[in-house]
Image (cartoon, rainbow, N blue to C red):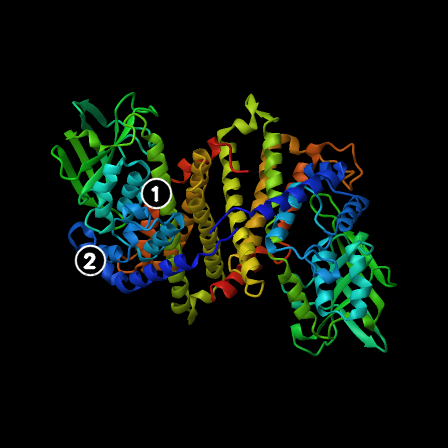
Amino acid sequence: MDLSFSKEEVAFREEVRAFFRDNVPPETRRKMVEGRHLSKDEMVTWWRILNKKGWGVSHWPKEYGGTGWSSVQHYIFNEELQAHPAPQPLAFGVSMVGPVIYTFGNEAQKKQYLPRIASVDDWWCQGFSEPGSGSDLASLKTKAERKGDKYIINGQKTWTTLAQYADMIFCLCRTDPAAKKQMGISFIVFSMKSKGVTVRPIQTIDGGHEVNEVFFDDVEVPVENLIGEENKGWDYAKFLLGNERTGIARVGVSKERIRRIRELASKVESGGKPVLQDQGFRERLAAVEIELKALELTQLRVVADEGKHGKGKPNPASSVLKIKGSEIQQATTELLMEVIGPFAAPYDEHGDDGSNEAMDWTAQIAPSYFNNRKVSIYGGSNEIQRNIITKAVLGL
Amino acid sequence: MDFDLSEEQRLLKESVDGLLTDAYDFEQRKKYMAEKGGWSKAVWSKLAEQGLLGLPFTESDGGFGAGGVETMIVMEALGKALVLEPYLATVVIGGGFLRHGGSAGQKAAHISGIIDGSKTFAFAQLEKNSRYDLFDVATTAKKKGAGWIIDGEKFVVLNGENADTLIVTARTAGGQRDRSGIGVFLVPGNAKGIAKKAYPTQDGLHAADITFTGVEVGADAVIGDPENGLALIERVVDEARTALCAEAVGAMDESLKTTVEYLKTRKQFGVPIGSFQTLQHRAADMFVALEQARSMSMFATMASEFDDAKERATAIAAAKVQVGKSLKFVGQQSIQLHGGIGMTMEAKIGHYFKRLTMIENTFGDTDYHLRRVTDQGGLV
């Protein structure tokens, strides 16, 4: 048992840090530190820098542009990226549809889509949830009817993150209405520019626009856009959701936010002294830091296990990561609220789309707190995570 | 970075688990509790035979030169079986003082007796007003000729009644809460001037309140520097805290297993109660609490070998906070999910709850250690 990184791993960490320091556009970093939204251009610019370095799709197999790093190296890369902070690669392309395509897609599909995911020539979004299908995803109703060499798609998706920027969507559609729930679903990809696709924004409680409703009205999609086999889409969806186990704890994000809390709490005064000198506040902050340290160790256990024994049989501790990671992220936004106190109130109705420079940094703290309630809901709610522990770990 | 056990460590775990599976089920434990002193000499001999009492000592002292991970393995196993024997007091704490502070003569005089199982130790540290502050010492040790005279009162000394040797913290100079002027003394358990009031503790162990009245010891009784013993005390107590974290992880692990088993077998409304989602989610939260505690127990184990005393202390304090929070949740919910049967002496689950509860209040509770981490400026 050994906690320390090897010499090579330490050197790698230094390399990664230096690269972020020298290459993340300072404006991008500043906006992330202040919890602001980034514009599409800012994100794409950074991802292309990353991709040029060869790190854009780091965990993909080498033949498709991956790095061949060890699981510890991936861990270090993610931690440093989150802690810098810099935007993580667009999950919908890089972590979700990419691996499905290189695992289940045909050669033509690999050739057509993978390079464009890596270079962010296509911005992808995810068409999974529907108004009536949240945690019970397999009840989804959007249907794709085969007509000659086309699918005709009708239905509605929701919570589609950043669909307003998207060029492509990967979509779970029902192709066999007679089959049992999970059996009649297919994994189909198509252009968001297709005729019959309508995107309607959903404003979330923070005032922001991240998610959308997406409507399909007789959208014609060539049959070659089916990934893998027809009616096997549920298997690919499960593969996709199980793929990203460790990044989900977002330890680096929380670390960065704790540094931010310390910085602000040493400037904002309460009772004639900085908030950071208030014993009660300090103890609440330390309590979150301890939880975060425990989570970091839990994550390292999972990473070390994957490195040694492969990803086949996940370490049971991995199911802890989403629950604790989201709780801690939320706790850090609560502490920020506590620091700012009454000055959390002013609301900038022009919102923050990445261009509203007039907006005071304090105006982003309450929205960030409101917005972070999502992290215990998305990606399988924390209640669904508990169901998974119940069945997969405890055998109840 | 590696969290796996080495081949030797894996074998150690198998052997200690095997020994306790054979020798330490709940019924056997009741019998041991009824023996004189409240624990089993026969089990202690078995632990000695398997070399477990000699693990942390160097080979030149007759031991195996094992490190923190080995102690973690043993303590976790002892926690799983709710072992009553004084491993913490004797091997971890008594042995710790000898290893880190003992002179060659003291090592020669005491370590072989620990390793062969013939001698046990107790740590007489807690005082009426000291609570968790290790530097708060009112018991005095005054110079007399070459030796010392010890006067004072110590409380809740685990294994205090039966220990062959007491390790006593006493003030040689300064005021009650000064960080300097504290010495550590080896005192025979039957020395003249010692009076003991022995009693069982809530968790089935045995302790004693011990009064020292003009107890005379020789110059060779002092471990280390008689005026600056605090660093040694802190180091050994940090190892004891680390060991307690591992013991708690073992006890929580077994509590959760026992509880999940109960959820699968207990039926109400015609179905196993484990089919109810509200109980499933409680058990899932217990699992989360356990794994977070396990991570911090490992962290403390690795930190106990840090060179930087401050970094070590902060890490171990953080572990004690996480373990303290987790053990309270797992302990309480184990009883809740068992329902009425969990309230009875005859069910083993309540005994885990009691041991876990006592661990929280040993060498600093959750609030105490949270304050220590806070005062160090946190962990990030």
Question: Within the image, what quadrant is residue A378 found in?
Answer: bottom right
Discs 2, 1: same chain: yes
In the image, farthest residue toward the left: B192
Question: Within the image, what quadrant is residue A312 found in?
Answer: bottom right
Question: What chain does mark 1 sit on?
Answer: B
Q: Up-down: is B60 above or below A336?
A: below
The reply to whether callout 2 and callout 1 are in contact (CB within 8 Å) is no
Q: On the rendered structure, is B361 left or right of B108?
A: right
- Residue A133, image x and y in percent? 67, 63
Q: On the rendered structure, is B163 left or right of B367?
A: left
Disc 1 packing (10 Å; few <14; some 14–19; many ≥20): many
Query: Tag count in the figure?
Result: 2
Question: Within the image, what quadrant is residue A206 found in?
Answer: top right
The structure residue drawn at horizontal position 79% and vertical position 43%, both measured from the top left corner, is: A42
Task: Note whether residue A60 is visible.
Answer: yes
Q: Secondary structure at mark 1?
A: helix
Q: Which residue is mark 1?
A: B240
The structure residue drawn at horizontal position 75% and vertical position 33%, both measured from the top left corner, is: A359
Q: Which residue is mark 2?
A: B42
- Residue A355, image x and y in percent? 80, 38
- Residue A145, image x and y in percent? 80, 74
The structure residue drawn at horizontal position 66% and vertical position 37%, both measured from the top left corner, is: A365
In the image, farthest residue toward the right: A195
Q: On the rendered structure, is A362 left or right of A226?
A: left
Question: What chain does mark 2 sit on?
Answer: B
Identify residue type, mark 1.
Ala
Q: Secondary structure at mark 2?
A: helix
Identify residue type, mark 2.
Ala
Disc 2 packing (10 Å; few <14; some 14–19; many ≥20): few
Task: Note whether residue A341 is visible.
Answer: no
Of residue A388 and residue A87, the one placed in the foreground of this image is A87
